[in-house]
Amino acid sequence: MAKTADGPILEVENLTKYYESGGGLVDTLLGRSQEVKALDGVDLELYPGETLGIVGESGCGKTTLARSLLRLIEPTAGTVRYEGEDLTAASDDRLRALRKDIQYIFQDPFASLNPRLTVGDIVGEPLDIHDIAEGEARADRVSDLLETVGLNQRHAHRYPHEFSGGQRQRIGIARALAVDPEVIVCDEPVSALDVSVQAQILNLLADLQSEFGLSYIVIAHDLSVVEHIADRVGVLYLGEFAEVGPTEDVFQPPYHPYAEALLSAIPEPDPGWEGDRIFLSGDVPSPLNPPSGCRFHTRCPKVIQPKGTDMAQSEWRSLMDLKQRLRKADSLEAVTAVREGVEDEDLRQLSRSALEARVRDEFGLPETVGDREAEEVFGTALDHLYDGAFEAARTALNDAFESPCERTDPELFDVGDDHRIACLLYDDAYPETPTRRS
Amino acid sequence: MSTDRGRIRITGFDADRVESREPLSDWTETRDTETEGRWTRAWREFRRNRSAMLGLYIVIAMSLLALFARPITIAGVTVQPISLAPYDPGAILYAQGLDVSAYEAPSLAHPFGTDGSARDVFSRVLYGGRFSLSIGFIVVLVTAAIGLVYGAVAGYYGGRVDEVMMRLLDLIFAFPGLLLALIIVAVLGKGYWELVLAFTAIGWAGYARLIRGEILKVKENEYVLAAKALGARDRRVIFRHVVPNAIAPLIVQASLSIGTVVIGVAALGFLGLGLPPSSAEWGTMLDQTRQTIVQGPGGSIPWWVTVFPGGAIFLFVMSMNLIGDGINDALDAQEGEDVARGGEV
Ligand code: SF4
């Protein structure tokens, strides 16, 4: 379903959620607590009848986003407008009433159903809460709902533990449908299910959408799920959108480097397919202290080289990795490759050239780096390392290898119709970045 | 060869209408017996437990005996006319012109003998159950209810509310329980309701702490969040979703502590701080006759005046503990069953 002429049914602006961490009373008093930036200024719109997919690795803020949308978690800042009404400013009573319009489907169909209630009571609960139906009418409505999601009305007297995962997820869907909502936020609706059941649940969601004219926000870590269900996709990285656009556009170039890496990881059933899987270096950084500039720069394979530098992109990436690793480490172990079967070796005993070989080995650097200046800096840094002067090595690397990506936080640049990417590569200020060469 | 994605489609994902929705694969008619509720299941489990059932029978028997020991009149109307006890528990028999002296050994006429005031011990033990048992049940009911609400509120809201409420609990825990009860009775004076109050005051804190801990665990479950997402009020979330899933340990604890309360009441009675001296409460009866344990009149020891009330306390407390263990096992087994059947509840 494409965008309709109507305005968005749900409009989110600058939604932000910071958690206090290390937060005892004493820590707060001493100013020791830190903020975890789970969600940092997210904007999105949802149009009536469409499905917006949101993807990202675990820990990127997906669930926080989904829950802050409904104020199941209080957002730190930002607004969520449903048909023009600001949810974040609504009173408790108003918010409860609004829950009839915006519903939520949980990831884990085992944890999200109260084991002490029968299926009939679980599905009927929203009817009780909002005084929608009582007695006979309630029982009828519950049977209707169960039939709608493909269960049998006879199941109303059973307990959740008597059902399989897929069936339970159907119960969860029936519960969400009971209030006749307009918008349903689905938090990883199928990730806890067997692959064979996933398709059934996704199809059910699609059916219900056309039957009841629902709008969905579907959160997933699995791009193939989103590809098949979403009209538009937002790719979330460390609490910010990296790329937003219609599904076909996001799944085709131009890509955000992060989206490209995610896409390359989708298994392809075609044996004749030769696309390469892009491996991202490092882990997802902690949102406690997100990287400066572009949050993806610590892992980005296309991280931009500074003006005047010219070397193979993989070498540049390796040098960036070395620099980042050194920032956190004060030992040679952290920056050298491990030798198989050798334990407790004293790296300080290595000769200068042996050390150099080990470092090159760890970061996949060739004998000599393509750029002569860079090679010199690398040599200097190694000298310092050999002398045990970590601070000096750090400074040498920091001064010479600084990507613009570390300094500038890219906004979402328009790259097509309604397709936006938060990457400096798509900023007109960097028209001919050396990266394009690779 | 190509690097285009999607030349082969996974057909399962084609979002055509699915005509035959999931055939509910593991659903066989053999499982189509009527679903059992949680308590039905627990009761079935409990009934299999012989010692617990023995305890239950004893407690029921003792309660019935106490109930039917003497007629009960409420506001002049006799609601329970049956009188199992042969004599009035307070009556001094020789004063009524009967041929009975103090410390008569058990005989057919007085199966438990008579005490130092020539009262019929059998009648007194039967009747005395009314005090001990009713105090036990009332105190546990009231304390568990208070503790449940208190702990539920503290645990559910957490944060500062929890902090303040828990400090108050610490205050109560700072006193040794029985000592606090003793002080309260000493201040308020002797009497039935004074005893209830004293034991309630010290008893609820344990339940509150227990249920708070459970609720801290249970409230993290997603179904609690799900109820909030549906728009449920806090009261509904707490008492429909959180408490029913946290209450099992409370029930076990309550059934086990009925015995403790009865012993506590008897202990106060024995210390002379229970009910008025002449009342037939078991502990007080022991107190009245404790000199006789050492040496009775005429050099003989009238064991019956202590053994029978003491035995009654012992029997009741032991039975209550058997029941408590039985409940514990029944509810535990049930949790296990859930896991086995549900996979990962
Ligand atoms: S801005 Fe730089 S680091 Fe961020 S995605 Fe683009 S190229 Fe990579």
Image: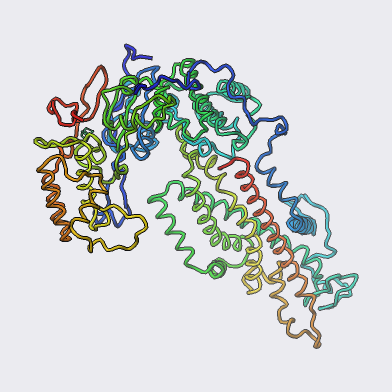
Q: In the picture, which quadrant includes the C terminus of chain B?
A: top right
- Residue at the extreme top of the image, as rendered: A5
Which sits in the foreground, B106 or A286? A286
The answer to whether A43 appears left or right of A154 in the picture is: left
> Which residue is at a point 22% across and 52% down the rendered structure image?
A357
Residue A170 visible, this angle? yes
Task: Report x, y in % for residue B12.
Answer: 50, 22
Height in image: B141 above or below A112? below
Q: Quadrant of residue B7?
A: top left
Quarter assignment of residue B139:
bottom right
**Image color mode:** rainbow
Quarter holding ligand 1: top left
Q: Is residue B238 above or below residue A218?
A: below
- Percent across and percent down for residue B59 are 74, 58
Which of these two is toward me, B253 or B345?
Answer: B345
The image shows residue B294 at horizontal and vertical percentages of 73, 84
Q: Residue at x 34, y 61 (%)?
A: A343
Tell how many labels.
0
Taking the view exactly as shown, the residue that stands out farthest to the right is B108
Q: Is residue A178 visible?
A: no
Q: Residue B204: image x %, image y %?
A: 54, 57
- Left or right for B340, reference A382: right
| Residue drawn at 35 percent across, 40 percent down | A59
